[in-house]
Amino acid sequence: MAKIITLLTDFGLKDGYPGIMKGVIWTIAPDAHIADLTHSISPQNILEGALALARAAPYFPPETVHIGVVDPGVGTERRPIAAQLGDAFFVGPDNGLFSLLLEDAEQKGATIKVVHLDHPGFWRPTVSSVFHGRDIFAPVGAWLASKIRLEELGTPITDPVRLQIPRPEPIPGGWRGAILHMDHFGNLSTNIPQSLLPAQARDLRIRLGEVEIRGLKRAFGEGKPGELVALVDSAGQLSICVVNGSAAERLNSKIGDVIEIRAQRPKK
């Protein structure tokens, strides 16, 4: 059975860099199926890449090889790495891009193996100091898909870099969180999971800046066009949205903005 390889980068599509990586992969693993997760991660935005990869990877078959390249430290002392996390493989820079996936594997007690890619026999013969996606990560991913064992690709390590991702904090009567991601539609995804929300959606009060939202919608269609609503997004996180519009533009929001949730007090 041909292996699946996914690509996630901040390269965009204009300059052909993702296509070049595919050419390298198919030269080594001509039967590989390649899926583009996205090449529209904001330039150098490691957290955005980590969130996108963590949301997408669980929906792929076992033994999929995920190559992620959001790499502002390319050509420096930062390590190239590969990892087995659960039943999937990951290849990319050691800069925190795989932090959420590593944390998930730890919580599940799944297999965790990480290697420093220090065996250049699995790289392209000439390595550019500014395009490790082509010269290291693409060939290593292709070799993994060709049944080369992870341990053959490099030296085991136990200290991969981890992002410091904001966590919800308890406050009187609720939780304080932050906006972590803005999607293509301008929806604002937070770090507050559904598990921290009140059992009764109507009891929820949400404050973002000077704006307060009461209650929780189950779907966009429950609101009126232009209405500012809160709902649980497809990743299970509290999100702030404008029906048929952009909450990011409406609220002039940015990553890291504080959001607070509380349960409404029952009327006497």
Image (cartoon, grey):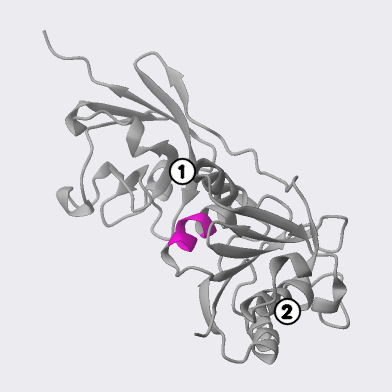
Identify the residue at image location x=46%, y=51%.
182
Front one among 22 and 151: 151
Q: Residue at x 34, y 53 (%)?
A: 234
Q: How many marks?
A: 2
* Residue type at tag 1: Asn
167 sits left or right of 212 in the view = right
Residue 24 drawn above or below residue 96:
below
Q: CA distance from mark 1 to mark 2?
A: 42 Å
Q: Which residue is mark 1?
A: 252
> What percent of the width, then of the height, locates residue 34?
54, 81
Residue farthest to the left, as pictured: 268
Region rendered in magenta: 53-58
Secondary structure mainly formed by the magenta segment: helix
Q: Quadrant of residue 128?
A: bottom right
Residue visible at 39% across and 28% down in the picture: 210
Q: Is residue 55 magenta?
A: yes
The first of marks 1 and 2 along the sequence is 2
Describe the element under mark 1 as helix, strand or loop: loop
Decide whether residue 19 is among the magenta residues: no
Mark 2: which secondary structure?
Answer: helix
> Where does residue 64 sit, x and y in percent of width and height?
53, 71
